[in-house]
Amino acid sequence: MYLSVSLRGQAQGVYGNLASKDATYEDLVRALEERFAPPNQTELYRVQLKERQQRATETMVKLDQDIRRLTNLAYPKAPQDVKETLAKEQFVDALVNSEMRLKIKQSRPVDLNDAVRHAVELESFYRAERRQQGMVRPTVTQPHSGTKEMDDMRNTIKVYRKR
């Protein structure tokens, strides 16, 4: 089996543990699925998918990849269009920035790739805006230390004028 030489790490170990070296492709696929995507853990993957939130320094692409992985593990027998819809909705819900979440929902993305594209675009806009705001000097002026004294002098002058 030529595929076996392409396996790395734990997958290579799974192949090495097959009882017969005359194992078929189907035997290898079954063994790999049992090791890496056990069918009795779909409920666990569904919970992980539902609870998945964007991490502090996580990129949109990494979040997208993890959402796709969890969706495929949580719903292995679902049709692809259903998986795509579930993944898209979970991706948007996993975003920590509520303003970004709302804007992406308003854009009505057709699939997960569309939602990720919108998220990456918005993220770059927000980053550029923050950078620009950091370069602009504040226009609020600080009162100088003599302001109180000036007010006192004005009040004293008003008192003398009234006399």
Image (tube, grey):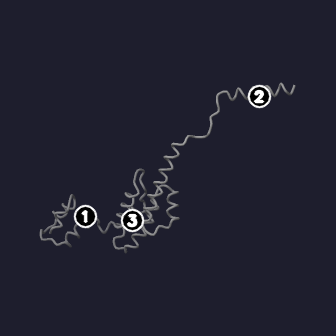
Between marks 3 and 2 in the image, the one whose residue lies nearer the viewer: 2
Question: Which residue was labeled with disc 3?
Answer: 46
| Other-residue count near label 1 (Cα within 10 Å), few / some / many at <14 / 14–19 / ≥20 | few
Question: Which residue was labeled with disc 1?
Answer: 35
Residue closest to the eye, 109 or 15: 109
Question: Which residue was labeled with disc 2?
Answer: 154
Where residue 27 appears, as percent x and y from the top left, is 19, 71
Where residue 140 appears, as percent x and y from the top left, is 62, 39
Left/right placement of residue 35 relative to residue 64 reads left
Query: What amino acid type should be assigned to the residue bearing mark 2?
Result: Arg
Among numbered discs 1 and 2, the one appearing first in the sequence? 1
Q: Measured along the vertical axis of the image, is residue 129 above or below residue 155?
A: below
Helix, strand, or loop for circle 3? Answer: helix
Residue under the image location 36 percent in, 63 percent down: 70
| Other-residue count near label 3 (Cα within 10 Å), few / some / many at <14 / 14–19 / ≥20 | some
Helix, strand, or loop for circle 1? Answer: helix
Residue pushed farthest right?
A: 163
Where residue 37 appears, as percent x and y from the top left, is 29, 65
Q: Quadrant of residue 38?
A: bottom left
Quadrant of the image for the C terminus? Answer: top right
Q: Quadrant of residue 147?
A: top right
- Which label belongs to residue 4? none
Residue under the image location 64 percent in, 28 percent down: 145
Query: What amino acid type should be assigned to the residue bearing mark 3?
Result: Arg
Left/right placement of residue 110 relative to residue 143 reads left
How far apart are the alpha carbons under marks 3 and 1? Answer: 18 Å
Among numbered discs 3 and 2, the one appearing first in the sequence? 3
